[in-house]
Image (cartoon, rainbow, N blue to C red):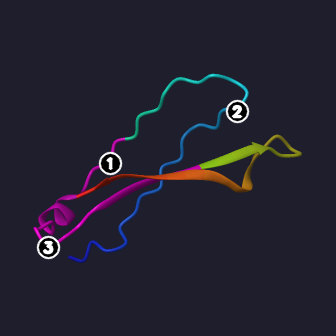
Amino acid sequence: MDVHGMDKTVTGEWHSAQSVVQEHQITAQFNRDAADSLTDSVSILLSMGIEFGTAGYTNDIVAVKHAGCGRVLAIR
């Protein structure tokens, strides 16, 4: 199995940037087929991105363009 380009999107609750919120924990797990493909010649890059949003005209959440952050968490 080719594990190139595997990704998973997780959407959590939206919180106001003007309030303090509790930490959130997200757990990532490989399925069995992907785990079996991991060998000494395979490198894994784990990264995460955060999207910022704001309340729109009808109080629905709208993504803020050109705002957000990302971080490489681990390379194996």
Question: In the image, which disc is placed on residue 28?
Answer: 1
> Which amino acid, mark 3?
Ser
Is residue 23 toward the left or the right of residue 61 in the image?
left
Q: Is residue 22 above or below residue 17?
A: above
Q: CA distance from mark 1 to mark 2?
A: 25 Å
C-alpha gap between disc 3 and disc 2: 42 Å
The structure residue drawn at horizontal position 27% and vertical position 72%, both measured from the top left corner, is 3
Neighbour class for label 3 at 10 Å: few (<14), some, many (≥20)? few
The magenta region covers 27-50
**Residue at image mark 2:** 17
Where is residue 52? Give x, y as percent: 67, 47
Q: Which mark is residue 41?
A: 3
**Mark closer to the chain start, 1 or 2:** 2
Residue drawn at x 31%, y 74% is: 4
Q: Residues within 10 Å of mark 1 (few under 14, many from 20)?
A: few
Q: Are marks 3 and 1 in contact (CB under 8 Å)?
A: no
Query: Is 40 inside the magenta-drawn segment?
Result: yes
Give how far apart the Cα atoms at labels 3 and 1 are: 22 Å
What is the three-letter code of the residue carrying label 1? Answer: Ala
Task: State the image quarter where residue 38 is shown.
Answer: bottom left
Most extreme residue toward the right is 57
* Residue situated furthest bottom in the rendering: 2
- Residue 74 higher or lower than 1, as above or below: above
Tell me the SS state at disc 3. loop
Q: Earlier in the sequence, mark 3 or mark 2?
A: 2
